[in-house]
Image (tube, rainbow, N blue to C red):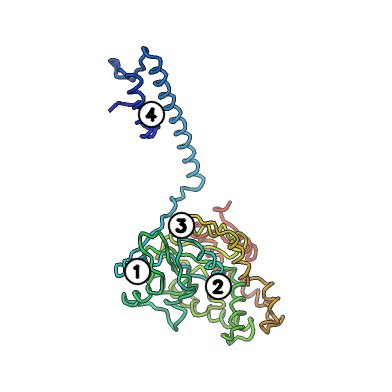
């Protein structure tokens, strides 16, 4: 085969070099002198111009290649060597020859999971079962901590069947799993390739919203929010003293009004089993302010193609927006609540003090880039100070 200059062989795509070789063979003859360097024939003008054109193409591609290399290096530096876009994975279940669940939204209650479910089910590469299967915990007095293969086979029947060649994911939205002390270990055993996501809400607002919901449904013995806080905070303080991460998770998992608003211990528990690349932390603040940004982040995390959701992003969120103070004020009469249901100053201060150590631990995780940065509103509310990472 004809030898090309080094610049051309490195910079010019193979297909272009092949075409150039064909042109050169038909238009002119390339000869070599005794030093074996590429020579352009002087006898035929057409061949000379073609040869010069090939050399010019080589130089242009070399120049473009160098610029592209420098640009890529700069881009990598700017995004701190962010790994390539994840690929959509299929962990095949040998018994059924279908894909196991590829992702789980594990938390937390009253934080926008229904909105996210309504949005993501529109994606053509996602097939979802019913929301809140709660198979591992939530629908039983104790979580399933010693599951056998036969039981998992029954669990997998609850999901749409996805063949490996479909390039489609199935997954689960069960927001009690984050505070299940043994679920992380069980999932890592049965679903090692799982992608995890959790959607978090400002702790005091989440606790208050959960109590409001439970009271409206007649599922709480606490007549007032003050009473619920007093009881659960006292129990949590006693239970969590000098305990391991797993034991702390077990404590908070039993108290879903205040306990489920403690995040750092549960995140650390899950991170023992799933690396940062498979664990995505999001915030309701971001979903409220820019749902497209959150959805893009999820698509990247799962290795999905970008999908134009259109108005469904805002329609889904607005029709379900029951998170803010406005909702509670508008619905006092409908739910039989009164102004006494607002958070009293003393209770609010107690919660600020109680949640502060957990928020400081969350901040340390964020500064170590283990999770996404905390929302500005959280930083302001708890007067948290950013460290050197954010300088």
Say which residue label 3 marks. Answer: 304
Residue that numbered label 1 is attached to: 189
Inspect this view and state whether residue 307 appears.
yes
User: Which of disc 2 and disc 4 is earlier in sequence?
Assistant: 4
Q: Which residue lies under the disc numbered 4?
A: 8
Q: Nearer the viewer, mark 1 or mark 4?
A: 4
The structure residue drawn at horizontal position 51% and vertical position 67%, both measured from the top left corner, is 264
Q: Is residue 276 left or right of residue 308?
A: left
Label 1 Cα crowd, 10 Å radius (few <14 / some 14-19 / many 20+): few
Residues under numbered marks 2 and 3 in contact, where contact means CB atoms less than 8 Å apart: no
Residue at the spot of label 2: 261
Chain-order first, disc 1 or disc 2? 1
Earlier sequence position, callout 1 versus callout 3: 1
Rendered-image quadrant of the N terminus? top left
Q: Is residue 234 left or right of residue 124?
A: right
- Determine the CA span between mark 1 and mark 2: 27 Å
- Mark 1 or 4 closer to N-term? 4
Residue 130 placement (x, y as % from top left): 47, 73
The image quarter containing residue 30 is: top left
Q: Secondary structure at mark 3?
A: loop
Q: Residues within 10 Å of mark 4 (few under 14, many from 20)?
A: many
Q: Is residue 159 above or below residue 309?
A: below
Task: Give the CA distance from mark 4 to mark 3.
Answer: 37 Å
* Left or right of 93 in this view: 298: right
Residue at the image point whose x is 40% and y is 14% from the top: 45
Verify CB contact (< 8 Å) between mark 1 and mark 3. no
- Depth check, front residue: 214 or 350: 214
Report the Cα–Cα distance between label 2 and label 3.
Answer: 30 Å
Instruction: Check disc 2 and report its element: helix, strand or loop.
Output: helix
The Cα atoms of the two marked residues, 4 and 2, are separated by 61 Å
Q: Is 217 located above or below residue 306 in the figure?
A: below
């Amino acid at each position: 085969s004809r030898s090309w200059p080094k610049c051309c062989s490195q910079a010019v795509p193979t297909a272009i070099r092949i075409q150039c070789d064909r042109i050169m063979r038909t238009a002119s003859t390339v000869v070599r002198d005794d030093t074996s360097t590429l020579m352009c024939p002087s006898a035929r003008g057409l061949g000379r111009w073609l040869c010069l054109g090939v050399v010019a193409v080589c130089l242009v591609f070399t120049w473009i290649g160098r610029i592209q290399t420098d640009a890529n290096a700069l881009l990598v530096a700017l995004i701190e060597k962010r790994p390539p876009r994840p690929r959509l994975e299929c962990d095949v279940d040998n018994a059924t020859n279908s894909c196991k669940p590829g992702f789980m939204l594990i938390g937390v209650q009253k934080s926008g999971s229904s909105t996210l479910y309504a949005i993501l089910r529109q994606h053509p590469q996602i097939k979802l079962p019913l929301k809140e299967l709660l198979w591992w915990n939530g629908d039983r007095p104790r979580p399933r901590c010693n599951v056998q293969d036969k039981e998992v086979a029954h669990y997998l029947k609850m999901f749409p069947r996805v063949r490996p060649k479909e390039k489609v994911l199935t997954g689960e939205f069960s927001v009690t799993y984050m505070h299940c002390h043994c679920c992380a270990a069980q999932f890592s055993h049965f679903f090692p390739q799982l992608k995890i996501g959790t959607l978090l809400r400002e702790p005091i607002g989440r606790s208050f919203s959960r109590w409001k919901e439970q009271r409206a449904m007649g599922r709480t013995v606490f007549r007032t929010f003050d009473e619920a806080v007093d009881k659960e905070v006292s129990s949590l303080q006693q239970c969590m003293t000098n305990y391991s991460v797993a034991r702390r998770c077990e404590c908070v998992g039993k108290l879903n009004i205040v306990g489920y608003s403690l995040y750092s211990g549960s995140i650390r528990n899950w991170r023992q089993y799933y690396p940062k690349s498979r664990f995505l932390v999001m915030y309701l603040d971001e979903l409220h302010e820019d749902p497209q940004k959150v959805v893009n982040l999820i698509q990247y995390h799962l290795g999905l193609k970008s999908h134009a959701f259109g108005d469904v992003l805002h329609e889904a969120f607005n029709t379900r927006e029951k998170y803010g103070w406005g909702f509670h004020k508008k619905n006092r009469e409908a739910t039989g609540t009164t102004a006494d249901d607002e958070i009293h100053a003393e209770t609010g201060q107690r919660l600020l003090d109680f949640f502060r150590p957990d928020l400081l631990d969350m901040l340390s995780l964020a500064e170590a880039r283990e999770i996404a940065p905390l929302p500005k509103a959280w930083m302001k509310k708890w007067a948290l100070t950013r460290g050197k990472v954010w300088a």
